[in-house]
Amino acid sequence: MKLTEHFSFEELTFTNNADLIVRNRSDAECYMKQLKYISATLEEIRAILNVPIRVTSGFRNNALNKAVGGSPTSGHTKGLCADIVPIGVSIEDAFDLIQFNKDKCPSLKKCIKEKIGGAEWLHIETKTERFQPTKFYTTNNGKTYTEVS
């Protein structure tokens, strides 16, 4: 089911954990409004980067979140976050482009450049209130974050 032009419910609820995918998708149905919000934010980012985006992690129910070592307070469990990798643009360049063009992404609440154990991705969080500030962070361990201004 399409949530926006380029993002689907299936993509935002996918997991490689075969034991948890059915339950994760079932639990995600209660978060359709939030999944539409994050999809809209991803559309704004896709327009800034002008490349396709691969979602590596979207909605995670509590069991899946625990299985992947996510924070108990993770926005993934509320359908408000997605981890992404742009296709054809480096994580570093994508982070810089999003930060430079943040006015073109009014629904973006948080963008975190994560680099952990050789893997890199952008963690994207959508706003739930119009006037929330947009913030940018980096992390190399997923536990400590440095704000980038």
Image (spheres, rainbow, N blue to C red):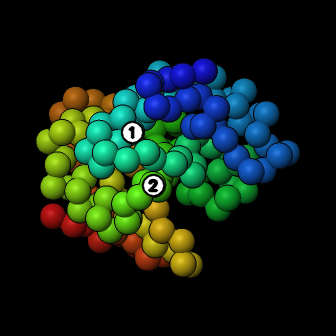
Image point (72%, 27%), residue name:
26
Disc 1 to disc 2, C-alpha distance: 13 Å
Q: Is residue 17 above or below residue 131?
A: below
Position in image of residue 69 (x %, y %)? 64, 62
Please tell me in which quadrant of the rendered image residue 113 appears.
bottom left
Position in image of residue 74 (x %, y %)? 51, 50
Image point (60%, 21%), residue name:
1
Is residue 85 something one can see in this rendering?
yes
* Amino acid carrying mark 1 in the image: Leu
Q: Quadrant of the C terminus?
A: bottom left
In contact (CB < 8 Å): disc 1 and disc 2: no
Residue nearest the viewer, comparing 19 with 54: 54
113 to the left or right of 76: left
Image point (83%, 46%), residue name:
18
The label nearer to you, 1 versus 2, is 2
Please tell me in which quadrant of the rendered image residue 97 appears.
bottom left
**Pointer 1 local density, CA inside 10 Å: few below 14, some 14–19, many at least 20:** many
Position in image of residue 89 (x %, y %)? 37, 60
Tag 1 secondary structure: helix
Q: Is residue 16 above or below residue 36?
A: below
Residue nearest the viewer, comparing 115 with 4: 4
Image point (70%, 46%), residue name:
15
**Pointer 2 local density, CA inside 10 Å: few below 14, some 14–19, many at least 20:** some
Residue nearest the viewer, comparing 31 with 100: 100
Indicate which disc, 1 or 2, sits on the residue closer to the N terminus: 1
Kindly identify which residue carries mark 1. Answer: 42
Kindly identify which residue carries mark 2. Answer: 87
Position in image of residue 23 (x %, y %)? 77, 34
Residue with the most extreme right position: 19
Please tell me in which quadrant of the rendered image residue 47 appears.
top left
* Amino acid carrying mark 2 in the image: Ile
Is residue 109 something one can see in this rendering?
no
